[in-house]
Amino acid sequence: MILILLVVVLSGGSKPEKPLKKPPEVAAKEPAPKKFVPDVSAFEIDGKKKCDEGSALVSGRLNAEPGAPKDRVLADLEKGLKLLKDGLEAYDKAKQIAGKTYSLDSHRTVQKRGIAAFCTGLEKEGQRYCDDGLAVIKATQGRISDTSKLNDAERKSLHDELKKGVDLIRNGMSLFDRSYEVSGNRFETSQYQEAMKVARPIMLELK
């Protein structure tokens, strides 16, 4: 009897253990796809080469000796500014394509100083040529209204004056173009264009 009670106590007194639950399986995260960055190394190499060469050339001429030939100084400034413009444009393309940024403040500072040194005098000279040419053409207005009344000497004189005016305007506008190529500066030239449109057919008529 005692043995039976012990068996009952030992076997029936404890609850059966619940099976352990397995932790939920977590799916492994896939690595995020790498962002595609376009290759702009060609633009960067080209930009660095031209900016370095242009800055060196412009800086050298900004600090040129007072006795240095003016034509040589201007030619070097123009060449250096063209290199800088092309080099900075190459970096701009790289930035647009790949979204990268570059430290170019030193090159832009040299460019700004070079433009001031090169373009200011060039633009003033171009303006003077254009204004002089316009004045020459305007001074002929009384004679170009009826060229049939002019004798041969007067026709030749009028032709030469018109040609002088047109040539002056052309020279002035060519200086504007040189400034634009390195600076991007634009100029109001409509009155000079109109003057040449008036002069050219008269010149052909007087030949």
Image: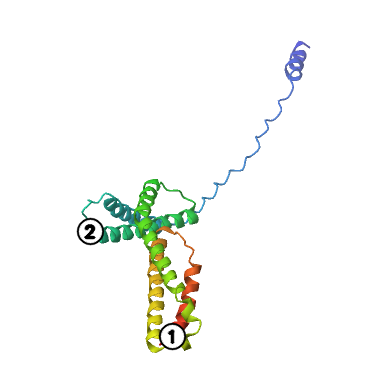
Residue at 48% of width from left, 72% of height from top? 193
> Front-most of 16 and 202?
202
Q: Position of residue 45 (x, y in %)?
A: 36, 56
Q: Is mark 1 on a helix, strand or loop?
A: helix
Calculate the distance from the C-alpha at mark 2 to the C-alpha at mark 1: 41 Å
Q: Write down the residue under mark 1.
A: 204
Precedes in sequence: disc 2 or disc 1: 2
Q: Does 164 sit above or below residue 204?
A: above
> Front-most of 157 and 75?
157
Q: Does 184 sit above or below residue 65?
A: below
Figure label count:
2
Callout 2–callout 1 Cβ contact below 8 Å: no
Quadrant position of the C terminus in the picture:
bottom left
Q: Where is residue 4 in the image (x, y as percent from the top left)?
A: 77, 15
Q: Write down the residue under mark 2.
A: 69
Quadrant position of the N terminus in the picture:
top right
